[in-house]
Amino acid sequence: MVTKAKVTVDDVKKSAASAASTVKAAAASASEATKKAVEEVKKEATEAKKTATKAKATATNKATETKKTAEKAVKKAAAKVKKEVAVSAVVQYQDREFTEAECLKKAQAQFKKDYKKETLEEISIYIKPEERKIYYVANKDRVGSVDL
């Protein structure tokens, strides 16, 4: 039995050595695989960074283009808007002189007196100096007159 035990211990030692070398080889192989996996992940991360940088650059370019387009549109719109010409009208009749603005104010005041509950939306005035009167049509259907 002792012989069998010695053989068995020797067999176990050989098997253990064989297993240890197998484990070492597997560990080395696993280590290499891990290194390869890490390298691949690094490459993918680098590529992802490059892609993100390109996307950011593209977005920045598009934003800049959009801003430039908007600025051009604003400039065109501003160019289309013309300055209003200042207008004033003065009527001279015999020894009297009155402006369009004065006549308009008088017509509006008379409308407010004549039609107290209504809101003035639009008004047209007709000045007749020979009659010394200002006639008005307000809100398309309200008429009246006031002295110059």
Image (cartoon, rainbow, N blue to C red):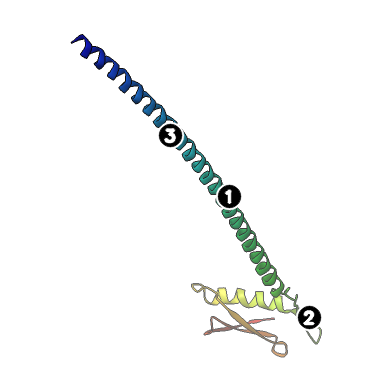
Check disc 2 and report its element: helix, strand or loop: strand
| The N terminus lies in quadrant | top left
Residue 16 x, y percent position in the rendering:
32, 21
Camera-side mark, 2 or 1: 1
| The C terminus lies in quadrant | bottom right
Q: Is residue 51 left or right of residue 125?
A: left
The correct choice, above or below, for 136 with respect to 86 in the image is below
- The residue lying at 25 percent from left, 16 percent from top is 7
Check disc 1 and report its element: helix, strand or loop: helix
Instruction: Say what amino acid the circle numbered 2 marks.
Output: Glu
Q: Which residue is mark 1?
A: 50
Decide which of tag 2 and tag 1 comes sooner along the chain: 1
- The residue lying at 72 percent from left, 75 percent from top is 82
10 Å crowding of disc 1: few (<14), some (14-19), many (20+) = few
- The residue lying at 53 percent from left, 44 percent from top is 43
Q: CA distance from mark 1 to mark 3?
A: 31 Å
Decide which of tag 2 and tag 3 comes sooner along the chain: 3
Q: Which residue is mark 2?
A: 97
The correct choice, above or below, for 75 with respect to 58 in the image is below
Residue 44 x, y percent position in the rendering:
51, 46
Instruction: Say what amino acid the circle numbered 1 marks.
Output: Lys
Q: Which residue is mark 3?
A: 29
Between 146 and 98, the one lying in front of the other is 98
Q: CA distance from mark 2 to mark 1?
A: 80 Å
Determine the image quadrant of residue 126.
bottom right
The correct choice, above or below, for 39 with respect to 147 in the image is above
Determine the image quadrant of residue 105.
bottom right
Between 46 and 54, the one lying in front of the other is 46
Q: Is residue 96 left or right of residue 38?
A: right
Check disc 3 and report its element: helix, strand or loop: helix
Residue 103 x, y percent position in the rendering:
69, 78
